[in-house]
């Protein structure tokens, strides 16, 4: 399935949480395993694959003294985790042709000694903190948190013995890290997973007709590279669709860097783009990758691409599933909340049915047509025949407005059914507009369930509405044939 490996990697490496106001925060997934090269990168040495948590305990026991103050140990362990995650997430060595994630050479990475003993207190601290790592403000990628002992060797990062002195003076772990790395660093918490990680090659060539976040990332990198290599044409628009403009940029890139000129981003081209991009930005921890995410966020603020996981994806999947009952060429999709390849194919079929460019990108025109077509369908069917999946709170408070909104559409679908079983709540028309009728129904719902009757659907009201809808709609009730 096209991009399946990449979507899994992206979903499980950089996870998105939508916060009030519609902004997004990204968290790196903590890998289950890490492969360590027992030597310098250039040594012919053994590779060992160990559990990530055991690797951190081993490095911490090799680099630190168990008698040090707890806050000093925590600060150092945060740095150790951050260095390891930086290497894994960026595929620092794999992108250079090696078959490991990190070395055990302190000259390049950090010390690891196979089969060594682990100190109990260090083990306990790692168990508590192994999902926490360091980032600079407004960045995604874990900091390559350079450190040294501070006595025999010196560096620009954390001094291990100096961290002991600071801890004895009462510094917290975060204050110690800010002392050495600057006030713009923070400790954030990743998400442990059992799946593979990496923002690397997706496993299949990226080529003409493909679309998604991975395409957008490569477009933005090529556009940045073209500033230094003007023979590479700018991709316009950089919108996540691999069209002729992207193909021409790839062909020019391959010509300049002596790659087979196919116009396809295969594995060799993928990693060469990343190598050149990294060299141009001159940032070993790839801080510019954070700016790419900022650009992606800006570009996709009103657009959905394959790889997206925002709440609107589940709404879009629901609409596609409803429309598949009325348009035979539109395929039904599962409510995964992930813009995966089957969802992209569903979008493409919808676009073909409606005479739109079949890009698989849900841009403003596609979204508007999806939304308005769904409104037309719901205007002809009774609410008791609808079947709404759970859609998590989108991070936006909804109140009276004359503009159509996807979130309002979901609110009205829920209220239209709830009003059938709870007499105190008036019915609403499903039109996607938060009108007077919708506001009255929201106030009645809030009053009925002991909420502040503001007429605004905030997170508390949304979650309670979803709970009541689910309870009334599905509890002990079998879904009849023909239900949407």
Image (spheres, helix red, strand yellow):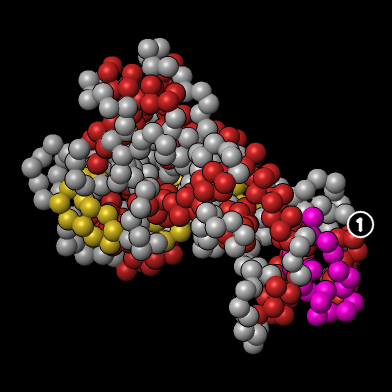
* Residue on which the image places disc 1: 436
Tell me the residue at 28%/62% (across/down).
51
Q: Which span is picked out in magenta?
A: 413-431
Q: Is residue 348 left or right of residue 256?
A: right
Is residue 427 shown in magenta? Answer: yes
Task: Determine the residue positioned at 46% across, 59% down.
Answer: 191
Residue that extends furthest to the left in the rendered view of this protein: 44
* Closest to the observer, 297 or 452: 297
Question: Where does the image place residue 370, in percent across and percent down from the top left?
Answer: 65, 49
Of 172 and 464, nearer the camera is 464
Q: Is residue 152 above or below residue 380?
A: above
Q: Answer above or below: position of 471 versus 112.
A: below
Q: Position of residue 331 (x, y in %)?
A: 51, 57
Q: Position of residue 156 (x, y in %)?
A: 38, 32
The residue positioned 54% from the left and 43% from the top of the image is 352
On the question of residue 167 being in view, the answer is no
Q: Nearer the viewer, residue 301 or 16?
A: 301
- Is residue 209 among the parts visible in the rendering? yes
Quarter-wise, where is residue 55 in the image? bottom left
Residue 269 found in image quarter: top left
Horizontal placement of 284 versus 224: left or right? left
Residue 94: in magenta span: no
Depth check, front residue: 91 or 447: 447
Name of the residue lying farthest toward the bottom:
476
The answer to whether 479 appears left or right of 178 in the picture is right
Q: Position of residue 324 (x, y in %)?
A: 57, 59
Q: Residue furthest top?
A: 230
- What crowding class fits label 1: few (fewer than 14 Cα within 10 Å), some (14-19), or many (20 or more)? some
Height in image: 315 above or below 388?
above
């Amino acid at each position: 399935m096209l991009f399946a490996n990449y979507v899994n990697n992206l979903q499980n490496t950089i996870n998105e949480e939508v916060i009030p106001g519609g902004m997004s925060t990204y968290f790196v997934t903590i890998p289950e395993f890490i492969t360590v090269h027992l030597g310098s990168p250039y040594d012919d040495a053994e590779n060992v694959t160990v559990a990530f948590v055991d690797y951190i305990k081993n490095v911490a026991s090799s680099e630190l003294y168990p008698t040090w103050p707890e806050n000093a140990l925590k600060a150092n362990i945060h740095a150790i985790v951050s260095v390891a995650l930086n290497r894994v997430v960026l595929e620092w060595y794999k992108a250079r042709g090696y078959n490991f994630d990190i070395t055990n050479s302190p000259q390049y990475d950090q010390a690891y000694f196979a089969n060594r003993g682990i100190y109990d207190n260090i083990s306990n601290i790692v168990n508590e903190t192994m999902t926490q790592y360091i980032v600079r403000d407004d960045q995604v990628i874990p900091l390559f948190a350079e450190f040294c002992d501070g006595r025999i060797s010196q560096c620009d990062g954390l001094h291990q013995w100096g961290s002991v002195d600071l801890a004895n003076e009462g510094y917290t772990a975060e204050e110690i890290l800010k002392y050495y790395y600057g006030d713009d660093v923070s400790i954030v918490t990743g998400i442990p997973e059992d799946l593979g990680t990496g923002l690397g090659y997706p496993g299949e060539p990226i080529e003409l007709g493909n679309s998604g976040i991975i395409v957008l990332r490569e477009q933005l990198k090529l556009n940045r590279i073209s500033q230094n290599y003007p023979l590479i044409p700018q991709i316009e628009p950089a919108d996540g669709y691999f069209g002729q403009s992207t193909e021409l940029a790839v062909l020019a890139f391959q010509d300049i860097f002596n790659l087979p000129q196919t116009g396809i981003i295969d594995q060799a081209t993928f990693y060469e783009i990343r190598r050149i991009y990294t060299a141009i930005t001159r940032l070993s921890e790839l801080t510019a990758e954070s700016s790419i995410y900022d650009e992606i966020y800006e570009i996709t603020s009103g657009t959905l691409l394959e790889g997206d996981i925002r709440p609107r994806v589940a709404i879009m999947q629901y609409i596609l599933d409803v429309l598949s009952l009325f348009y035979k060429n539109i395929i039904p999709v599962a409510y995964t909340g992930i813009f995966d390849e089957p969802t992209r194919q569903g979008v493409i079929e919808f676009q073909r049915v409606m005479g739109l460019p079949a890009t698989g990108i849900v841009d403003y025109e596609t979204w508007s047509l999806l939304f308005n077509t769904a409104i037309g369908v719901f205007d002809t069917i009774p609410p008791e025949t609808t079947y709404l999946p759970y859609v998590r709170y989108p991070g936006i408070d909804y109140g009276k407005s004359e503009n159509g909104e996807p979130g309002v559409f979901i609110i009205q679908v829920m209220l239209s059914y709830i009003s059938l079983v709870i007499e105190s709540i008036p019915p609403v028309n499903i039109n996607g507009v938060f009108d007077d009728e919708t506001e009255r129904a929201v106030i009645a719902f809030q009053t009925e369930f002991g909420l502040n009757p503001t007429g605004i659907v905030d997170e508390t009201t949304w979650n309670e509405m979803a709970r009541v809808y689910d309870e009334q709609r599905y509890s002990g009730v079998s879904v009849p044939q023909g239900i949407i």
